[in-house]
Image (tube, rainbow, N blue to C red):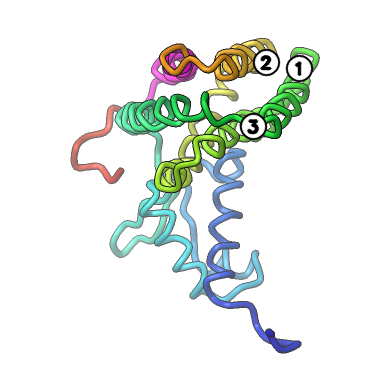
C-alpha cells in the first residue's frame, strides 16, 4: 500500500506531462515549430524539470518533438515525408487488425462502435476538430481491441498520438468530418460485422485513403531522409 502523503512516482509525472503536451499539440494550442521551454512547462504543470525532460525525450522518440542541440525542444513540423510514413505504417497495421477483427468482434465491440457512431451522427458543422479526432480514434481503438493481438496493439499505441496530430491537421484544414465521418465509419462497421476479411481490408484501405489524400493537398515541407521520424 502506498503511504498517505507519498509523492507520485516520477514516471507517473512524466506520463502526465506527455499526455498534456500530446493534447495541446493535437488541439493546435502548441503549434508546429513552437519552442517547448522546460522551465515554463514545469511551472505551468506544477512539476519539476525532471519529469518534463523525461516527457520530452518520450515525445522525441514518437516524432512529436524535435530536440535541437544547444537550443532545446520544439514541436515537430509536419512534413510530406511524415504523412507518407505514418500513413503507410498505419495502413499496414490497421488492415491486419481489421482482418483479425472480423472473426473476433463481440456484441460488446459492436455496441461500442454503435455508441461512437451515434455521437458522430451530428448536425453538420457542430463538431469541433478535436472532438472529431477523439471519436475517430475511439472507433479505431475498438478494431484493435477486437483484433486481440497484443503486439499489434502496441504498434498502434506507439503511433496513435501522431495519427491524432495528423487527423487534427486534416480536420482544421478540411472541416468536412460532420458530413463524412459518420457514413465512412458506418460503412466500416457494416463491413467488419460481415465476417469477410478481404472486404474488411479493402474497406480500411479506402477509408484511410481519404484522409491521406487531403493531407497531401496541404503545402507541407517535403522532409528528407535525414529528418527525424
Q: Which residue in the structure is indicated by mark 2?
A: 182
Q: Position of residue 127 (x, y in %)?
A: 74, 24
Can you tell which quarter of the image residue 57 is in? bottom left
Towards the viewer: 47 or 157: 157
Q: Indicate left or right for 126 with 229 as reference.
A: right
Tag 3 or tag 2, which sits nearer the N-term? Answer: 3
Q: Which corner quadrant holds the C terminus? A: top left
- Cα–Cα gap, marks 2 and 3: 21 Å
Q: Position of residue 111 (x, y in %)?
A: 73, 29
Q: Which residue in the structure is indicated by mark 3?
A: 106
Can residue 176 be seen from the camera position used here? no
Residue at 56% x, 53% y: name it: 21
- Label 3 environment density (alpha carbons within 10 Å; few <14, some 14–19, many ≥20): few
Q: What secondary structure is marked by label 3?
A: loop
Towards the viewer: 175 or 11: 11
Disc 2 vs disc 3: Cβ atoms closer than 8 Å? no
Q: What secondary structure is marked by label 2?
A: helix
Q: Which residue in the structure is indicated by mark 1?
A: 121
Foreground tag (2 vs 3) = 3
Towards the viewer: 155 or 65: 155
- Cα–Cα gap, marks 1 and 3: 23 Å
Residue at 50% x, 35% y: name it: 147
Residue at 48% x, 31% y: name it: 166
In magenta, the rendered stretch is 200-220
Is residue 23 part of the magenta span, yes or no? Answer: no
Q: Position of residue 165 (x, y in %)?
A: 51, 36
Disc 1 vs disc 2: Cβ atoms closer than 8 Å? yes
Tag 3 or tag 1, which sits nearer the N-term? Answer: 3
Can you say whether 42 is above or below 105 in the image?
A: below
- Label 2 environment density (alpha carbons within 10 Å; few <14, some 14–19, many ≥20): some
Q: Residue furthest left?
A: 225
Q: What secondary structure is marked by label 1?
A: loop
Amino acid at each position: 500500500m502506498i503511504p498517505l502523503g507519498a509523492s507520485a512516482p516520477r514516471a507517473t509525472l512524466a506520463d502526465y506531462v506527455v499526455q498534456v503536451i500530446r493534447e495541446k499539440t493535437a488541439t493546435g494550442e502548441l503549434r508546429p515549430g513552437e519552442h517547448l521551454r522546460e522551465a515554463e512547462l514545469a511551472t505551468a504543470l506544477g512539476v519539476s524539470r525532471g519529469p518534463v525532460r523525461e516527457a520530452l525525450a518520450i515525445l522525441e522518440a514518437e516524432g512529436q518533438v524535435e530536440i535541437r542541440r544547444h537550443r532545446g525542444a520544439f514541436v515537430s513540423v509536419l512534413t510530406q515525408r511524415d504523412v507518407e510514413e505514418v500513413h503507410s505504417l498505419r495502413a499496414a497495421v490497421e488492415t491486419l487488425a481489421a482482418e483479425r477483427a472480423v472473426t473476433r468482434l463481440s456484441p460488446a465491440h459492436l455496441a461500442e462502435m454503435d455508441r461512437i457512431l451515434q455521437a458522430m451522427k451530428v448536425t453538420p458543422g457542430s463538431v469541433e476538430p478535436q472532438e472529431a479526432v477523439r471519436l475517430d480514434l475511439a472507433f479505431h481503438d475498438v478494431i484493435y481491441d477486437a483484433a486481440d493481438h497484443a503486439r499489434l496493439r502496441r504498434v498502434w499505441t506507439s503511433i496513435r498520438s501522431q495519427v491524432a496530430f495528423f487527423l487534427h491537421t486534416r480536420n482544421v484544414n478540411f472541416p468536412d468530418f460532420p458530413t463524412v465521418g459518420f457514413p465512412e465509419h458506418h460503412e466500416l462497421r457494416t463491413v467488419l460485422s460481415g465476417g469477410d476479411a478481404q472486404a474488411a481490408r479493402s474497406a480500411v484501405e479506402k477509408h484511410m485513403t481519404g484522409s491521406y489524400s487531403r493531407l497531401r493537398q496541404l503545402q507541407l515541407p517535403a522532409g528528407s531522409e535525414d529528418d527525424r521520424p
